Image (cartoon, rainbow, N blue to C red):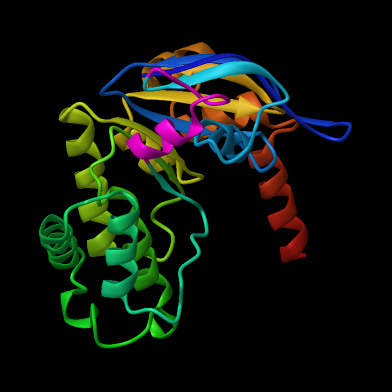
Amino acid sequence: MIRIENLTKSYGEHEAVRGISLEIRAGELVGLLGPNGAGKSSTLRMLTGMMAPTSGRAEVGGFDILTQSLEIKRIIGYVPESGALFEALTAWEYLTFVAALYHLPREQAAERIIQFARFFDIEGSLSEKPLSTYSKGMRQKVVITSALLHSPRVVFFDEPLNGLDANATLSLKTLIQSMAREGKTIVYCSHLLDVVERMCERVVIMHDGRIVADGTVPEIKQRTGQDSLERAFNTLTATENLLARAEEFARVLSQ
């Protein structure tokens, strides 16, 4: 479903993505991890057709990211880390607009909007007030809904739990896992390693623009000799022992 071959992205002299290759099958739920600046967001932007690679190639759903980006946009959903909304619109107006972009029939679009509104418990505010008055969590629910309205075959999540309360977080995590079981391909990008460890059947870790680990959580733990994904991540991506550093810093503060 997703195939990447020697993909690179450079910003001037800085090489953000350094020749990565990766294949993700249909129905896989893959956690994409990495510290800040690892190249995760650049990779997602290239796969969603938002940004052209410097070299290499990639396909999403059999479509080439360079020559068939419009076809890719039709079959994917993307929840960015900070999604922008047309704040003067109500949620109903905004979601109806998004549905029209995907050519959803009006009645089908209305039904799906109501279903998502009930799921996220925002049904009562769909048409009452503009998005500018929404809380961060409510805005995030609208962003997620807009990405899933057209039932995409591939979904890219970049920190989707930002701003969500505990109930919405549990609901969304369950929904994502259910979508993968139904055959949708999910790439889940997050800094919440405990969530990724519980949700994702496969984990890809990037560091300094390269893939440094790819496998199940037990495989990555065994490779690094660590007892948790968090510690394995630290081993693979940190230049120093961060746990020892934090303990030493705590001792300094207590003096």
- In this view of the protein, which residue sits in the foreground, 11 or 66? 66
Quick one: which residue is furthest to the right in this view?
13
- Give the position of the C terminus as an image quadrant: bottom right
Tell me residue 158's x, y (percent).
47, 46
Q: Is residue 80 above or below residue 242?
A: below
Q: Residue at x 26, y 73 (%)?
A: 92
Tell me residue 137's x, y (percent).
37, 70
How many marks are shown on the rendered structure? 0
Q: Judge whether residue 65 is colored magenta.
A: yes
Please give the range of residues in magenta.
62-76
Q: Residue at x 30, y 73 (%)?
A: 93
| Left or right position of 27 against 94 | left
- Give the position of the N terminus as an image quadrant: top left
Q: Is residue 165 visible?
A: no
Q: Is residue 226 above or below residue 254?
A: above
Tell me residue 174's x, y (percent).
20, 45
Residue 236 falls in which quadrant of the image? top right
Q: Residue at x 39, y 17 (%)?
A: 62
Residue 36 falls in which quadrant of the image? top right
Q: Judge whether residue 240 is colored magenta.
A: no
- In this view of the protein, which residue sits in the foreground, 203 or 224? 203
| Left or right position of 235 against 119 | right
Residue 145 falls in which quadrant of the image? bottom left
Tell me residue 163's x, y (percent).
41, 66
Q: Residue at x 58, y 25 (%)?
A: 66
| Left or right position of 10 against 169 | right
Q: Is residue 141 above or below residue 233?
A: below
Q: Is residue 167 visible?
A: yes
| Left or right position of 207 against 98 | right
